[in-house]
Image: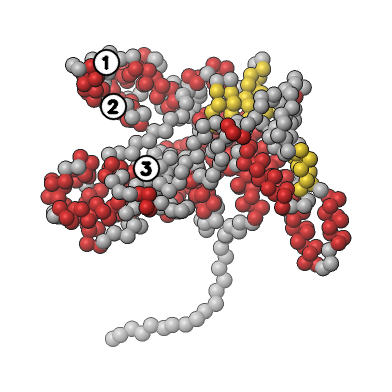
Amino acid sequence: MIASVRLEQTQSLKQTQTLKMTVQMRQSIELLQKNILDIRDFLIAEAEQNPFLEIESYGDEPEPFTESGKDGDMQDSCSGVDNTEGRELINADNTENISDILSQCDWGQLRDTSGNSFGDTHVRKQNYSDIDFSFENNLVSEETLSQYLDRQIVSLDLPDETRELMIYMAYNLDDRGFLKESDEEIALNISGKTELVAKARKELKKCDPSGCGSTNIYDYLIYMLVDPCVAEIPKKYAGHIKKLFVDVSVRSLLEKKDFVPLCEALEVKEDELHEILSAIRMISPYPAFRFSQFKPEFVQPDLKVFMEGDEILIHIEDRLLPTVNLNKETFDKKLKECKNRKEKSYMKERYRNAEWIIKSVSDRNRTLYEVAASIFTHQKTFIELGENFLKPLSLKDVSEDIGRNASTISRLTNGKYAETPHGIFELKFFFAKQVSDNLATNRRLETSIKEIIENEPKEAPFSDDDISIQLGRKGIDVARRTVAKYRTRMKIPAAKDRKKNYNFSSGG
């Protein structure tokens, strides 16, 4: 007996929650991403287009620094906490040997050619420094990979929690688009669930460019070529490529460029192996390949932090920002001249947009101050004593302290610099992980490992076990595998390789 299938049309109601990105919402997000020079350019450009924004002063000429200026509105004081560790950020860029294989191609041919209460309606600049500013000492900003991903993420129909995790990840990618932190580490850092982090990473990989958020080059290649295989590859080689990257022993043959045993392991001929490698080379060697990362030679700090007595003083560096007024008289005049409802609606929209811009800039500065105050209250010993006294601090700590979303803090700390008594640092620098029970941070661990290796006897380098013991004497109790992990991240060879390099260079 054959069962019949009944088709019919029905009406039903379904309630879904989606995010509608208004121009104003997008503008607020973009302003959080911008540094002081970008905001300056933005305000000048908007004032040229909007008749209701009036520039009173462009803020080009810095006013003399005075003691009374130090007590300005944008400056406040905050009390701090206790000691521990730190070191300047480095790009731990472990490209793996497989990148040598992938780089054997003309990648240049593949590059892409790339109703509200608005509060105050006046943004006032305050000049505190007598240091001359030159635009020649600053590079032109361009959209970064993080900002490009951010624009995609906010428009996705995903739960808020997932989007926030994705934004955090987007602003913590390295220069190649990888996110080396494990799902467990991210969950611990922002007080989330590991399964939600894994889902967010999976969604981030789907964004353009594909594979962003992969933990390393192999995770990226597996995503692109194996599971789910988003790249176009010949079906007849799908099984061979899967074996090539999933089977570690086969993969090691590719790293060593042992092509004869590699052909035997994959059960292919040399010409077929050549086709397989050609298919692999058709994808970008890493997710962020077509993005030129913004690496400033000179940066303009967004804020200054210094000690006065026992207090930490913070002020937002806004001397370059134009003084912008909301021109209510022009609006009233233009509104009376309107001939129909459509013109009136347009004028009101432009006026509301002008209000929103001024409010957004004010909110951005206020939020930046809140984040900075939270960071430097916790890192008071850094301001007092220097980099070796940076304390463990996570995004979750600041988020809970000021009651802001982690995504907001990620956007705000990316590309923003603070001038401190010990140099200029990106705000992200002050987020340091704890690596031992005595509050030692990852920055101090890296510094200590480097110092031990620099002072070791070159003819008999210390093993990771030896380094672990010496770190223990300094009060940093970490296991050998932790030493090996951070040594590898800093691209320092193992003891036997360091000895071999020394013997070779010394002629021994």
Q: Is residue 32 visible?
A: yes
Of labels 1 and 3, earlier in sequence is 3
SS class, disc 3: loop
Residue 493 numbered tag: 2
In the image, residue 291 sits, relative to residue 423, either above or below, namely below
Of labels 3 and 2, earlier in sequence is 3
Residue bearing the label numbered 1: 458
Task: Name the residue: 58% across, 39% down.
Answer: 412
Q: Quadrant of the C terminus?
A: top left
Count residues near mark 3 (Cα–Cα under 10 Å), then give few for <14, some for 14-19, many for 20+: some
Of circles 3 and 2, the one toward us is 2
Q: Position of residue 225 (x, y in %)?
A: 30, 54
Q: Position of residue 419 (x, y in %)?
A: 59, 26
Amino acid residing under circle 1: Lys
Q: Quadrant of the N terminus?
A: bottom left
Residues 46 and 220: in front is 46
Amino acid residing under circle 2: Pro
Q: Position of residue 65 (x, y in %)?
A: 72, 22
Residue 215 numbered tag: 3
Of circles 1 and 3, the one toward us is 1
Q: CA distance from mark 3 to mark 2?
A: 21 Å
Task: Name the residue: 75% across, 19% down.
Answer: 67
Residues 260 and 204: in front is 260
Residues 490 and 375: in front is 490
Figure colour scheme: secondary structure
SS class, disc 1: loop
Task: Name the residue: 21% across, 21% down.
Answer: 504
Task: Name the residue: 20% across, 53% down.
Answer: 274
